[in-house]
Image (cartoon, rainbow, N blue to C red):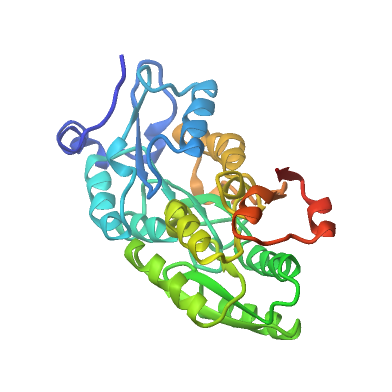
């Protein structure tokens, strides 16, 4: 038997749970735990599958003692606010939120239900007070986005020697103005001009990439963002048609057709860190005292097949440094 939460059932069957005190939420035999979701990723995304698979190993199995809110997957940023309110009214035990926009929506909706978040900069965006002592009702994983976006820019400049103008594709809801300024200054120090192209919605991505190419950018840095990650197919197609070398935040993106990816493995983060934190929250651990964690393993993946398709040659020294090369 599979237990899922439909929108009607979420509001009707769970409505009375909103007033449950946190202290009463310790793991209990025979109880069904209710997991709320705020994700732009689809329910069958590999990292989402990995999360539930490992959660099962930790004692929370859908169809046995766990009910999953499947309506919270594949949402647009505009849908997060309404769904977050629905989850709070239903009294779910924990809300899992992927990306800055989802976390903001969850935090606006509740200050009591635990929120497990994966975001680019937990402290910088004001989601938690500190990594060691988050305070409030939010904890999770922070991705070191400021440092990694800069590192990716360095790799991109190395991957496109001779290019004197590059572009950054940025999510206006995620990348702060100060971070963009830092990237501009870092590029200028390397003798490279950086143009910035911001988007707020899926429909703006293709035209932003066109604008980057029109600005004579010789390469594109796709900055850390749930919006951009979950719409990577649009980006892959557009940069391929424009023959524009591009850099991505997740190594898996290079495996899926992008040119270069550098960062932590998203599947590993959900399987090894997020699942463990989620199990603790379901058992009643106070999120204010559950430290925010950071990735410790990073991989560089280069897709030479993608490079060949756009007629770009990645310098041999960079290829030799890669953790994985796709021929």
Residue 212, horizontal then vertical, whole percent = 50, 76
Give the residue drawn at x 39%, y 33%: 25
Looking at this view, is 263 or 130 the one in front?
Answer: 263
Q: Is residue 124 visible?
A: yes
Task: Examine the image and state in which quarter residue 28 appears.
Answer: top left
Q: Is residue 124 above or below residue 165?
A: above
The quadrant in which residue 69 appears is top left
Is residue 136 in sight in this rendering? Answer: no
For the residue pair 260 and 240, the one nearer the viewer reads as 240
In terms of depth relative to the viewer, which is nearer, 100 or 31?
100
- Relative horizontal placement of residue 254, taking residue 286 as reference (left or right): right
Q: Position of residue 299 (x, y in %)?
A: 71, 48
Query: How many marks do you count on the picture?
Result: 0
| Vertical arrangement, residue 284 with respect to residue 127, above or below | above
Q: Quadrant of the C terminus?
A: top right
Determine the residue positioned at 45% across, 33% down: 282
User: What x and y, as percent, mark residue 156?
Assistant: 69, 67
Q: Does residue 92 lie above or below 262 as drawn?
A: above
From the image, which quarter does the N terminus lie in? top left
Left or right relative to 284: residue 218: right
Q: Residue at x 55, y 60 (%)?
A: 120
């Amino acid at each position: 038997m599979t237990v899922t939460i439909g929108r009607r059932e979420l509001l009707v069957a769970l409505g009375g749970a909103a007033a449950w005190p946190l202290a009463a939420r310790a793991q209990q035999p025979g109880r069904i735990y209710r997991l709320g979701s705020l994700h732009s990723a689809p329910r069958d995304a590999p990292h989402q599958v990995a999360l539930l698979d490992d959660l099962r190993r930790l004692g929370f199995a859908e169809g046995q003692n766990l009910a999953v809110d499947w309506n919270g997957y594949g949402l647009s940023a505009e849908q997060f606010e309404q769904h977050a309110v629905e989850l709070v009214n239903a009294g779910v035990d924990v809300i899992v939120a992927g990306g800055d926009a989802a976390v903001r929506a969850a935090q606006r909706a509740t200050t009591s239900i635990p929120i497990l978040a994966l975001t680019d900069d937990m402290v910088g965006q004001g989601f938690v007070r500190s990594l060691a002592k988050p305070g409030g009702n939010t904890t999770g994983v922070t991705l070191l986005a400021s440092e990694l976006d800069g590192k990716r820019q360095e790799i991109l400049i190395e991957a496109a020697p001779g290019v004197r103008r590059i572009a950054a594709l940025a999510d206006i809801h995620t990348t702060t103005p100060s971070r963009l300024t830092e990237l501009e200054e870092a590029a200028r120090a390397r003798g490279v001009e950086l143009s910035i192209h911001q988007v707020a919605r899926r429909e703006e991505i293709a035209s932003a990439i066109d604008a980057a190419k029109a600005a004579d950018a010789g390469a594109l840095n796709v900055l850390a963002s749930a919006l951009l990650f979950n719409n990577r197919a649009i980006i892959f197609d557009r940069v391929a048609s424009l023959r524009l070398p591009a850099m991505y935040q997740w190594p898996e993106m290079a495996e899926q057709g992008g040119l270069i990816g550098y960062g932590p493995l998203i599947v590993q983060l959900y399987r090894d860190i997020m699942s463990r934190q989620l199990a603790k929250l379901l058992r009643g651990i106070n999120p204010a005292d559950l430290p925010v964690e950071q990735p410790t393993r990073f991989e560089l993946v280069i897709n030479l097949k993608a490079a060949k398709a756009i007629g770009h040659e990645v310098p041999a020294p960079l290829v030799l440094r890669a953790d994985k090369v796709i021929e």
